[in-house]
Structure formats: structure tokens, C-alpha cells
Amino acid sequence: MRRAIAVIAGLLGAGACAVAQNTAPRDAGADPLAVVARADQLAARPLWPGFEPGSTPVAVYDGNRTLLFRHSSPPEGFEALRDHPDILVYEGRHPAVTANSSAAIGGVSTATLMPGAQASSVTSRAGVLIHEKFHVFQRSHHPGWSANEVELFTYPVDRADLLAIRELETEALRRALEGSDADRTGCWARAAVDLRRERFALMPAGAVAYERGTELNEGLATYVERLATGEWNDASLRSGFPPDAVRQKAYETGAAMGRLLSRLDPAWPQDLERNDSTPLDVLLERAAAVPGTVACAFTAAERERMGAEAAAAVEGLHTRRMAARAAFLEQPGWRIVVEAPSAPLFPQGFDPLNVSVVTPSEVLHTRFVKLGNAAGEIEVMGRGAMTEAAGDHPLFNGVRTLTITGLAAEPAIIEADGLATIKSEAIAAQFRGATVRRTGQTVIIRLPGS
């Protein structure tokens, strides 16, 4: 576990966001030059104390090539873009660009952007880029604004009592945002804080720290993104998050608390800059502490309804997990099974927005995972893979088995000079000393011991 905790920051950078697959075609709405130019326009207004997005290096993969902007020391493989000598281009996806996130490219912290949906506007894509630039700022100025992703995999998502309180708390935040005056906003903000205090008292300390850290990390980045674009999404606080969408929910609750703080205490960003270890809910509690004339509380019927909905949601979660596991394992076609019984594989990268703990020892990665040990490494990008734990933790005590299913054709595996190499559109792997055997349509790669 110590090794796992030590590599968390390297795995996620600023925290990967949900992105489209890396094979998405280019389109006018995703033109990197237009997106970067629009982000510059949006960042002309002050967004956060000390944040200067116009100077942040940027790497954008558009589905065909990676473009590098404002980078002081580009690594090998980048060349000047024709007609734009100040922009550099790399054919294909640069290995460091795996998500909407930030990454060290040429030793420089760089905001990274993947292809967006075909319908994405230039403004919304520019907002995402500002979000990722803010992560670069956070890593430099506020390294404590992060969460330990180890906790995500053991967060108590199957407790209906906690989920019911969480949904009441979220509804209180939404009503506070809808408040037409300071009294109404303040009283529902206080109700949200009270519900959170009630819920946190029933939770493990690690889970509490995970929520607060993710709100400071992703919630603040979302707040800055929407402040730049003006595209506030109050509907996002309504029901719709499944019980295990803990990380996704924190994007919204963090942004909502930031918006409420801006109404109740406009100087809150400067206060947080001076004391950056203060959780957002603590800042909100202070800002809403002045008693108002309006009393805000949920009725017994509302609490009862939320409890019933939470119980049904948890039951549905178990059903969906088993269905997802079965659907993954039952996919027709070829499969690859990497076995590491003696020297487990450890995570080198994964997308926390696209993982699901389907059993206590199995994690389904639906977009991206990278694992490695002394024998080599494997990366799966743009398709599903399932890991089986080697220890008590679902992922961070190491992985005993990695399974990839549903391949349309037999994977090409080259064995030469003691190396087994896999290269395909979605899978890249190289292991030394591995044994490879085929059983029907299953390729089993067994790794050597330590």
C-alpha cells in the first residue's frame, strides 16, 4: 500500500476527466488552434488569484496528431507546425497525453486535452482547457488540493443511509443556489452544511478526506471553468448520480459551494489562498453562519422518500455491477489474459472517472489503464479491461491478473530476444521473460516472478 500511495500523484496528475476515446476524428469544433485561442479570450478576465492561464503550456491531441503550445522544452518527436512556427506538432497521440488532465511533457507541467464529442462547441472545449490549466496551477501553488485515489475504491458506496443524507445535502445546495435573497440562500446553505456534518460523522476519515480533497481539486477547477464560460449547470445537482459516482459528484458539489461562497463572501478565494488547507464546506459554514429569518428544513415525507430512493439505488448498483462484469466476460472474440502470480503488476495510470469495483477484488476499467512491474508494462486505451487484485485492496496492493476481452482478431504478439511485444490500436505491451500460450481464442501471457 505504501508504494501505491507514493505513485498516486504521478498516476493522475491533476486528475483525469471523462474524455472521448483517443480514436475520435478531427472536426471543426475541436480544432486545437481555435480552442486555444478561445481559451485565451475567456481567460482575459480574472478567474482566480494568481492564476495566469495564458502562460500555461498546452498539449492537444485532435485524433490524428498532438499539438504543443507555449512549451519551453519540447521533447524529441515534435516539429514546428507549417505556417505556425511557434506551435509544435507530433504525429499521433504523444504517450504522455492520455486524458483531459495535466502531465509532465519534457519535464514541464502541461495541460492536456483529448478529442471531444462531435457536438462540442469551441467555447465548451475552451472551458475544459481552462479547467486543465487550473490543475497545472493547483499542482504548482497548492499541492495539497488533491485526494488519495486509494480511498475511491473502498468508499462506502453501498450504504443507503449515507446515500440518503448525501442526496438531501445536494438538494439543499441546489435550493440555496435557487434562493432569491441572502436569507434563503444562507438558510439552505446552512442546512446543507448540517447534513454534511451528520453524514461525515458516520463515515471513515479516509472517505471524508477523499470528498473534501476532490472538491478542492476538481470542484474548484469546475468552478473556474464555468466562471470563464458562464455555462453554469444548476441541473447537474439534481438526482442522476449513481451511488458509486463519488468523484463525479464532487465536481458538482465543489463548484456549487464555490458559487454559493461567491454570493455569501466574495473575498473567499483570497481567504483560501492564504489558508489553502481549509475545506470548502468549512468555508461555506463560516460564510452562512449569520442566522437568517427563514428556517429551512426537509419534511419527514421528503426524508422518507429520499431514504427509499437511496435503498433502491444501492440495490440497482449491485445489479449493474454484476451485469457489467458478465457483459465484459461474455464478449465474443479473442481475449488476452496477463497473469502475474509471483510479482504483481502495479498501476501506473488509470482513469478514475471510468472505473467500477465490480467485486471486492475485481475492477473494471472502461477507458484506460496502465500497469507494470519489473518485467515490463501494458497499456490499454479506448477499450475495457478488468483487473483482479493480488491483495486486500482492489487495486493498490497490486494486480494478479489483467483480462481484455472482445478482440475482433487474434492479437499480434512478437516474441524475440526474450521479449513478448503486443502492439495494436488499443493495446501496447512489452514484457521480458514472459511465456505465451494460446488456448482456443485466449492468449495467456504469464509473467516471471520477482
Image (cartoon, rainbow, N blue to C red):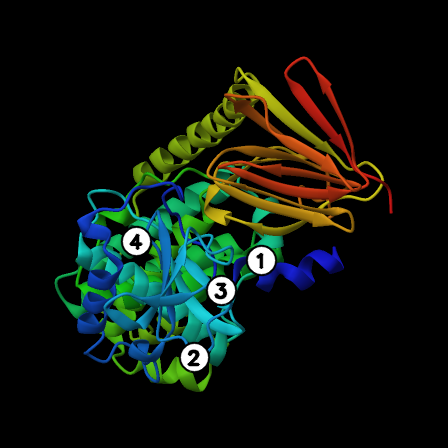
The quarter of the image holding the N terminus is bottom right
Residue 245: which numbered mark, if any?
none
Q: In this view, does 330 lie above or below 107?
A: above
Q: Which of 253 and 134 is in front in this view?
A: 134
Marks 4 and 2, how far apart in space?
A: 46 Å
Residue ID for mark 1: 11
Q: Nearer the viewer, residue 393 or 20?
A: 20
Q: Position of residue 168 (x, y in %)?
A: 36, 47
Q: Crowding at label 1, few (<14), some or many (≥20) Cα neighbours within 10 Å?
A: many
With 320 as the anchor, is 205 left or right in this view? Answer: right
Q: Where is residue 34 in the image (x, y as percent from the top left)?
A: 19, 62
Query: Residue 240 is drawn in which quadrant?
Result: top left
Looking at the image, do the residues carrying marks 4 and 3 touch, with CB atoms under 8 Å apart?
Answer: no
Q: Position of residue 43 (x, y in %)?
A: 23, 74
Amino acid type, callout 4: Ala
Q: Which of 5 and 293 is in front in this view?
A: 5
Q: Residue at x 23, y 61 (%)?
A: 35
Marks 2 and 1, how far apart in space?
A: 23 Å
Amino acid type, callout 3: Ala
Amino acid type, callout 1: Leu
Residue ID for mark 2: 72
Labels 4 and 2: the sequence-earlier one:
2
Marks 4 and 1, how far apart in space?
A: 34 Å
Q: What element carries label 2?
A: loop
Residue 172: which numbered mark, if any?
4
Q: Crowding at label 3, few (<14), some or many (≥20) Cα neighbours within 10 Å?
A: many
